[in-house]
Image (cartoon, rainbow, N blue to C red):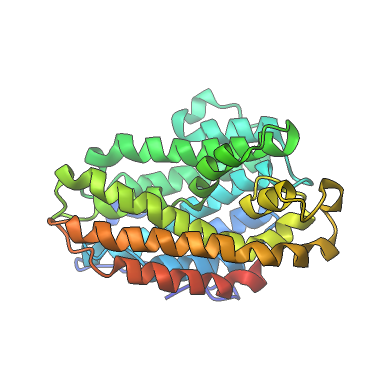
Amino acid sequence: MGLSVAGTILERKKGPEAFPPESVGLLELSEVMDLYKSVGRRNIDYFAWIHDVYSWITLPSVSFEWKSALSEDKTKLTVFDILADDLADNHTTRSFSLLQELAEIPWKEKSQTAETSEYLDAGRRIWEDSLSSVSCYPRFKEFERIFYFDLRQVLSSMMYSYLANTEGIENPIETSFYSSYGCLVEVAIDMDLMCSPAFDMRELGLVRTIACLAQKVAHVGNMMTTYPSEVLESDVSSPIISLALRKGLIRRDELGVASTVPKLSKLEWVFKSRAHSYIRKVAECEKEIRSINLRGFSDFLIELIDKFEGSRSLR
């Protein structure tokens, strides 16, 4: 079940067969959408698509009663992530001071933060609501430090994007390193593992290898649908734009112009080829996991590449 294009309220299951009521955040998804609409610039129908994807792809080890909460909480965290992304990448909404303050919200008590804008207030409310649910997951305490570590990488990637676009630090090595973190996949898999009772922590390194590769796959799928708008936004932190500039396919002064977009299409095969090489590595790694059955997760990633096409019209 997803959020309709009309913004239908997503109802959480109630009753003893559902997840514990104390894990429920205070905000419905529709309310989170309203918060984002009050300060954000994106088409919120995109978040409906995100929710549908999160409802479809979770680790097979997740307890059934937590799947609904996971898909909603991941969607809410994606909204928080996009609030940061808008401050980092878009030339009309870019703001270093707001990005810094938003990035510190998960590590500061409300009393330590002087809310000086509606934007920060929306970000804090969405973050606190998400955490109120995530912190009630069965194995949250075991993964808490890892979850915050991975979240830090997500927000650091946003800071890199900002500096790449404003301070000229962009380079292929760092862009390759940072760019995929914005897809939030490792954070999402942390959340799945919090709801996976059979998972053996001794296999965490192996699962994180899969998570990192899956994040790179998701990033390629996402990039294939976003680079046309990122060309118009002159976002050099997009790896395909960075590569096109280095290869001389486009000049920097051609960014921001719609006629530049088709010139990048000839590079799509480079990134799609990389994605399929990552998927092959996932297929190898998933066979080594013993405590939970991850076989076939690589097949989901193949489908995920195609699913991103469905979000193209929403960007």
Please identify the quarter of the rendering in which residue 73 is found: bottom left
Instruction: Tell me which residue sits at (50%, 30%) in the image.
Output: 110
Q: Is residue 70 above or below residue 130?
A: below
Quarter of the image that includes the C terminus: bottom right
Which residue is at 77% across, 49% downward?
234
Does residue 60 lie above or below 21 as drawn? below
Relative to 42, 306 lies left or right: left
Q: Is residue 39 visible?
A: no
Q: Is residue 142 left or right of residue 275?
A: left
Query: As drawn, which residue projects farthest toward the front?
Result: 247
Asked whether residue 270 is in view, the answer is: yes
Q: Nearer the viewer, residue 286 or 154?
A: 286
Q: Residue at x 71, y 55 (%)?
A: 230
Residue occupying the point 46% across, 59% down = 217
- In the depicted structure, whether residue 140 falls above or below residue 51: above
Q: Position of residue 81 (x, y in %)?
A: 54, 48
Dividing the picture into quarters, in which one does residue 132 lie? top left
| Quadrant containing the N terminus in the rendered view | bottom left
Task: Please tell me in which quadrant of the rendered image residue 226 appears.
Answer: bottom right
